[in-house]
Amino acid sequence: MSSDLMSFAYQVESEKTTQELTFEKLNIWFTNYPKSIDALFEVSYFTGNAKETESLEGYYYAFGHNILLRLPYTIRATSILIEKGFYYEAISLVRNLFESFIQLRYFHKHKDKINLHVLKQRIKLKTMFEEIVPGFYNEIYGKVFSEFAHGGFASNIFRVQYKSAEVGETIMGSNFDEMKCSFILNQVSLILFGILNYIPIMFPQYSFLVPKETETKRIKSIAWLDDLMIKQKSAKPGTKEYYELVDPLVRL
């Protein structure tokens, strides 16, 4: 059998070279994001408890805290995929991050709808997005994240590069792609910023319970992530419109 055929061994080796190049090109992110993950892990210890579990506040604390506990793992998993060049696969987790955070935001405003959502009739994500961040669902969630997550035609860009309607090249193995990698990391940074930003709002007891060291980590992480977004807008002015669209989701 020809050695030119794709193989598991080739895939594993390509992951290693992609990871090395990713760390080299995006050293600032991969050096600093663990500190933000640490902050996210730690804040979940200090959200407090509802006085009455069978109350609107109790429902939100249970629902919201469970989401909060999952988020650092999802962000870490997304980063691992990005490191090794699994950009298409990482998109689905980015979509999950947006879905998780929009639920935290929406049900914080509508605690009375949590039981309905969990036990009877699920509230559509479109309803949540349109209330919190108008326009995002149609322009970004639907056209980008859902298209890729559901294996739409646009997903081909991750494995095939067309030179014309008749000529194309299949991308074998993992390969570092700075544009795809940066796009996904920008979304992760955005969500991580929003989560850390809204912790004291969504969980009011946090401000009274959190030790100074943990709060300092949260504040420093927010500042670093905000700086990343500012630099992104400065380097690529075309992204300014996107950040203005998502601001209502992540900024106070």
Image (cartoon, grey):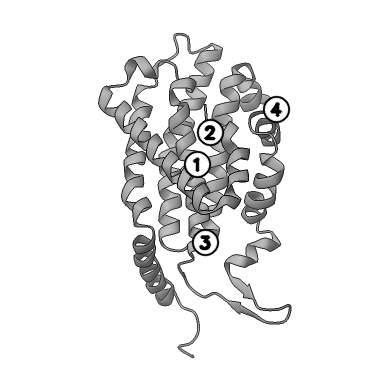
Q: Which residue is mark 3?
A: 179
Q: Is residue 179 left or right of residue 25?
A: right
Q: Quadrant of residue 153?
A: bottom right
Q: How many marks?
A: 4
Cα distance between the residues tagged 3 and 4: 40 Å
Mark 2 or mark 4: whose residue is earlier in sequence: 4
Q: Residues within 10 Å of mark 3 (few under 14, many from 20)?
A: few
Cα distance between the residues tagged 3 and 1: 17 Å
Q: Residue at x 52, y 31 (%)?
A: 251
Cα distance between the residues tagged 1 and 2: 7 Å
- The label on residue 190 is 1
Cα distance between the residues tagged 3 and 2: 23 Å
Q: Is residue 15 above or below residue 134?
A: below
- The label on residue 250 is 2
Instruction: Kindly report which numbered mark, 3 or 4, lies closer to the viewer in this rendering.
Output: 3
Q: Mark 3: which secondary structure?
A: helix
Mark 1 or mark 2: whose residue is earlier in sequence: 1
Query: Could you say which is closer to the camera, residue 103 or residue 20?
Result: 20
